[in-house]
Image (tube, rainbow, N blue to C red):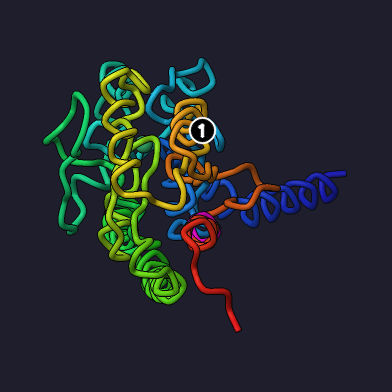
Amino acid sequence: MHKRVNRVSTLLLVILLSASPLANASSFKVIASFSVLGDLVKRIAGEDISVSTVVPADADVHNWELTPPNVLAIEEADIMFYNGFGLEPWLRHVKAMSDDSLTLTSVAENADFAPLPITTGQYKGATDPHMWMDPQGAAAYIEVIAHTLAEHYPDKADAFHARAEEAYLALQTLDQTIEERLDGVPNTNRSLFTSEGGFSYFARAYNLEYSSIWGLNHETQGNALAMATMSQRLAEKRVPALFYESTVSCIHADSLARETGISLAGPLYVDSLSPQDGPAFNYTTMLRYNAELIHEALGGARPE
Ligand SMILES: [Zn+2]
């Protein structure tokens, strides 16, 4: 009998020992503020850390309100990555409720990447938060993410840095692919006009003129002055298409498109990934999908 008990406790010990790396892994908790950033964090965290996101795919990061499950997850987390530069106005509630046990890191405000100002609406002149829309901006985010994770979980630092290197190279390839695709848009059509002002960095990266109906998404959408200004610009520029984004209503863009007789195109993905079965389920597919849609709607040359 005594022997049997011993064997059982040995077995238990073996189970506990073999289970311990898993237990450690699941005790790492990292949260990203929205789905696009969550995908970038997951690339670096790999299997070592469980990553969740506050704002789910297809929801609007600008206008989010924290849910009770969000609050519980944030309370248990070690690190929360957010974009910053005003993308997440609801972050003030996170700051108010969190203590020193939560590391709060802004990827955009710490990124080594040249900022652009918001050019229209009530936040005109402030730094445009949508830096991830340029793959080089995403690469700068990756550096901040890897550095923060490595500092927090030093025994996994080598794995984080190796994944960051891999992600960096993949972003360079993506950048080149998009550049080649958009090179096929004729010079006369290189104007990207969207609803929300989320594409400044994308437009700078790929040499497109850029204009939007309004600035940040939490402003009044499509007020009379903004609509009249865009209507006039569309009449002057005669762009082939006006775009809308997946997290905004298309009614404003649709009404301007009808009024000016140009095509309505979209949705483009910027502030959110699509659900898993959609066309923009991770960062890479999101940017590729946008590039294809823009290429087609702006009369890009068809591949031979
Ligand atoms: Zn936005």
Name which residue type carries label 1: Arg
Q: Quadrant of ligand 1?
A: top left
Q: Which one is in front, 29 or 67? A: 67
Specify the principal SS of the magenta part.
helix
Position in image of residue 53 (x %, y %): 49, 37
Residue drawn 49% across the image and 55% down it: 290
Position in image of residue 185 (x %, y %): 42, 68
**In this rendering, would 213 be left or right of 277?**
left
Residue where numbered disc 1 is placed = 258
Q: Is residue 3 visible?
A: yes
Q: Which one is in front, 82 or 228? A: 228
Write the start and end of the magenta stretch as one range. 283-287
* Corner quadrant of residue 195: top left
Specify whether residue 284 is painted magenta.
yes
Quadrant of the frame with the N terminus: top right
Q: Is residue 133 above or below residue 256?
A: below
